[in-house]
Image (tube, grey):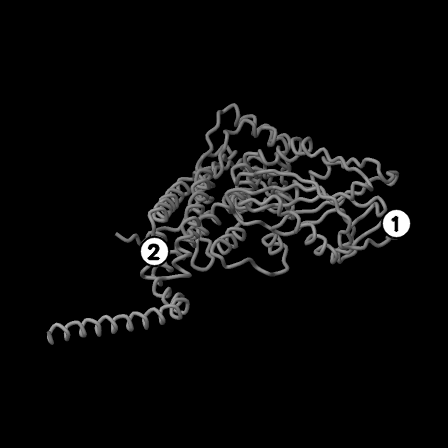
Amino acid sequence: MIFRPSLSLVLQAPPSLVYTISVLVLTEEETMAASFLSNLQTELANHTVRAGEAEVTLAFLVQPLELDAEVIEKVNEAVSSAGGTGVPALTTLLPASAPGHYSLLIAVGDKPRPSRVIIGAERWAFIHTTIGSVQEAVTAVKSMVVDEHQLKWRLEDGRGKGRSQGRGSRDTEEMRQVRAAQGYQVCLTLVAPDSSLATVDWNIEDATDRVLMPFLNHPGIARLANFTISSQVFHYTDLKFSPQRSKSGGYYVSSTSLPPMISSVESKLGSLVSQLPSLNFLVLVAPPTHSPLLIRDPRGALTDNFLVPQWGGVVIFSPPGEEEGGEEIVVRMEKVMSVFVRQLQLLLGVPITSSTSPGVVLERGTLGMTEWQLDQLMVGRMVESVSTATTALISLVELLDKVKNMVISDVIQKEVIASLGQLQECYRLAGDGELEAALTLSQRAMVSAETAFFDPSILELLYFPDDQKFAIYIPLFLPISIPIVLSSVTAFRWLTSSSSSRHSLRTSN
């Protein structure tokens, strides 16, 4: 039996993301609390984000936050005594939350006063508002939970529609992020002057353990992908740019001269070939003769680092001026690695925290990342993985419809069935609010779908189908076959004539 995956199975159901919002309304009137929850649920109605034919539905489940009376009393005391500034200290008393589950502490007053919103780092928010107003709560929830712009372009990116080419800040953010993958190869490279000029010590092991590994081991980052770290040292004699003297006494290079330098270094990075997408981070040690060395951007600002979208980052380290040729240069790798971590956050797509609204306070999380930031990144990666897997399966179905005689092997059939099952399980988990488990299933579905679509046997049948093999091989064998056919005809005639001659002799005798 020939296996043919059905398009209806691939498009059986769009993903639905369910968020649970647990709300504690600090008021003595129970009817007011119930009314507030009802109004909040109405305002947080289901919403569908669409990008072409792809879509994802956002659903919010609002429920009361159950806390002990003692905890509620402490929260009330903090709110009444300090206007809510003491609430962050009480967040340790809130129940532990998982991705997709958030807590709201809402203090409702009967007198008009400026609203106060505190968005915490651990999936919670505190809001001080007036009676009947739920708009601040809606804004806080949507700020923590979802970034619709990011979901839309990740749907488009997974569908292979490309990324926007605009000049807005959001478009720049999209263009620099790497695509979703099961893992990444993080390559740390020291680009140092020739060893005859100076020896360089960068103590990469200690800097990696102290700065980089805490970031990669953070639960919010570790669940996104597997990271493999490697390091290497290159010595250069010519970096394809000419530093210019600055008015401050140092040196600078124009940002327009960086691409040739990156190309010259990148051509030597092939020694660490990996099947995983590579993220390259270079420490460029400035020559002692051109130190300090900085980069001048088109606006005239000077900096010592720059980011290469979807590729990696570069930091220029300028050794102190007192170093003489042949002496050791010690690179301050902890400072350099901190820059690499920030660049890695931008490449992975960790949302940038900023608030321009008056009365809104954003808490800073561990390593500069809040839990709700990482949740947004996780959901975005899940949506992109689902979209990529679906696109690969749809492309496979369309390919089979075009090439009718293409036979699918058991290996491909197994991968397709596995991807379909993982997609359906991902949809179920996302609908149940189990977003972290849904992310894992979406990544597996993406890998299985792409493995099936890019199987070598399919490529062989696609580029060399049976009905075209004759057109390929006839020009090769025709020159050889013509003499063989003519010789065969001649031999047949000779055999026929010989047989006729012997028959005539027998008849005459």
Give residue 140's mark: none
Image position, residue 212 (x, y; %): 64, 35
Image position, residue 191 (x, y; %): 73, 44
Give residue 7's mark: 2
Query: Residue at point 72% right, 35% down?
Result: 334
Query: Residue at point 66% right, 51% down?
Result: 267
Q: Is residue 370 visible in the rendered structure shown here?
A: yes
Image position, residue 283 (x, y; %): 72, 43
Q: Mark 2, residues whose alpha carbon is within 10 Å: few (<14), some, or many (≥20)?
A: some
> What is the quadrant of residue 342 in the picture?
top right
Check contact, mark 2 vs mark 1: CB within 8 A: no
User: Across the whole image, how many numbered discs are drawn on residues?
Assistant: 2
Query: Residue at point 15% right, 74% down?
Result: 505
Residue sticking out furthest to the top: 70
Is 19 displayed left or right of 163 in the figure? Answer: left
Q: Between 250 and 266, which is closer to the camera in this rendering?
A: 266
Q: Earlier in the sequence, mark 2 or mark 1?
A: 2
Label 1 residue SS: loop
> Which quarter of the figure is the C terminus placed in?
bottom left
Q: Mark 1, residues whose alpha carbon is within 10 Å: few (<14), some, or many (≥20)?
A: few
Is 172 displayed left or right of 293 in the figure? Answer: left
Q: Between 346 and 502, which is closer to the camera in this rendering?
A: 502
Q: Is residue 60 above or below residue 211?
A: below
Give the CA distance from mark 2 to mark 1: 65 Å
Is 367 displayed left or right of 61 in the figure? Answer: right
Q: Amino acid at mark 1?
A: Ser
Label 2 residue SS: helix
Q: Amino acid at mark 2?
A: Leu
Is 260 displayed left or right of 221 in the figure? Answer: right
Q: Between 113 and 339, which is closer to the camera in this rendering?
A: 339
Image position, residue 121 (x, y; %): 59, 36
Give residue 248's mark: 1
